[in-house]
């Protein structure tokens, strides 16, 4: 019956919010561990390898020197990708230089790795947005871009941020294949797809809303609206 269904939905909502907060904490912890432990070990490894190669007392043969240098490159590459991974988990740039630079950073990654043309357009003042809101919007954009990468087959993406009339609007548009949007989105909960649903929940955590406009063959627009504090 209706009351029961409502209760179920409320409790699902409650848990999803807890999950989102826990997920953020967990990501922070993993990013820190990766950076502090694994990152430090890899750095040490590169230094040790350097020291072995550089010490004439070791009298290394040419082939051994070449092997060492290969190992060194490998360790440096691992360190690079580990740093990138830690950044994605907990973008330090978000804390340092804010939402817009972070969006430009994921846009650049998408351009470099997937050849998708991403354009970030901003018509707002970042300092009007509390840090919490910046993180939430960043996560929504990140998830939207993951979806575009995985499902859309798009060649162009526009991320637009605009503040007007007491609210902030973020629109992420792709020119990909589009899809039939499930109504309501909570339907997706039973299929273990949590991307769109999580994006919606995050928007609602900021007392905002998420809308999806998608047309088969024409692409998708994800529209997030969040009230701005006066
Ligand atoms: N930009 C997009 N273009 C085309 N289809 C999309 C787009 N975004 C989402 N979809 C469709 O909507 C579905 C639901 O997306 P959602 O992010 O909720 O789940 P998912 O990506 O399949 O799994 P995950 O839980 O890992 O995110 C996708 O499976 C895909 O079919
Ligand atoms: Mg997804």
Image: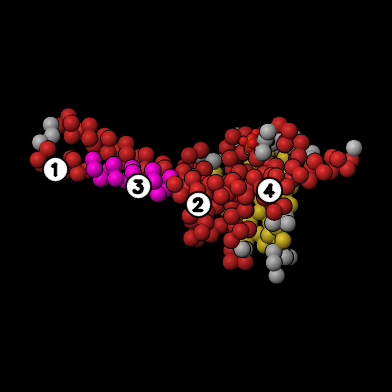
> Magenta stretch containing residue 222, yes or no?
no
Mark 2 is surrounded, within 10 Å at the Cα level, by few (under 14), some (14 to 19) or many (20 or more) other residues, namely: many
Instruction: Write the start and end of the magenta stretch as one range.
Output: 34-49
In the rendered image, residue 2, in percent from the top left (x then y), is placed at: 89, 40
Q: Element type at marker 3?
A: helix
Q: CA distance from mark 4 to mark 3?
A: 34 Å
* Residue 91 image label: 2
Using the rendered view, name the quadrant where residue 3 is placed: top right
Does residue 164 appear in this view? no
Q: CA distance from mark 4 to mark 2?
A: 21 Å
Q: CA distance from mark 4 to mark 1?
A: 56 Å
Task: Report if the CB atoms under discs 4 and 3 are less than 8 Å apart.
Answer: no
Would you say 32 lies left or right of 230 here? left
Q: Could you tell which of marks 4 and 3 lies nearer the N-terminus?
A: 4
Task: Report if the CB atoms under discs 4 and 1 are less than 8 Å apart.
Answer: no
Q: Quadrant of the C terminus?
A: bottom right
């Amino acid at each position: 019956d209706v009351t029961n269904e409502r209760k179920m939905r409320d409790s699902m909502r409650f848990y999803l919010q807890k999950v989102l907060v826990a997920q953020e904490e967990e990501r922070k912890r993993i990013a820190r561990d990766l950076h502090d432990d694994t990152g430090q070990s890899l750095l040490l490894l590169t230094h040790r390898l350097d020291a072995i190669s550089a010490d004439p007392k070791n009298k290394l043969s040419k082939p051994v020197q070449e092997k060492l240098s290969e190992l060194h490159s490998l360790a440096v590459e691992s360190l690079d990708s580990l740093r990138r991974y830690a950044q994605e988990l907990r973008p330090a740039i978000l804390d340092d230089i804010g939402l817009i630079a972070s969006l430009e950073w994921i846009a650049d990654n998408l351009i470099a790795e997937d050849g998708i043309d991403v354009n970030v357009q901003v018509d707002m003042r970042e300092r009007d947005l509390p840090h919490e809101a910046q993180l939430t919007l960043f996560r929504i954009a990140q998830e939207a871009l993951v979806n575009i990468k995985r499902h859309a087959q798009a060649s162009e993406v526009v991320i637009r941020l605009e503040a007007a009339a007491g609210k902030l609007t973020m629109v992420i548009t792709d020119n990909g294949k589009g899809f039939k949007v499930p109504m309501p989105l909570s339907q997706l909960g039973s299929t273990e797809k949590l991307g769109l649903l999580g994006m919606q929940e995050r928007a609602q955590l900021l007392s905002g809303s998420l809308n999806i406009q998608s047309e088969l063959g024409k692409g998708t627009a994800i529209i997030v609206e969040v009230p701005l504090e006066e």
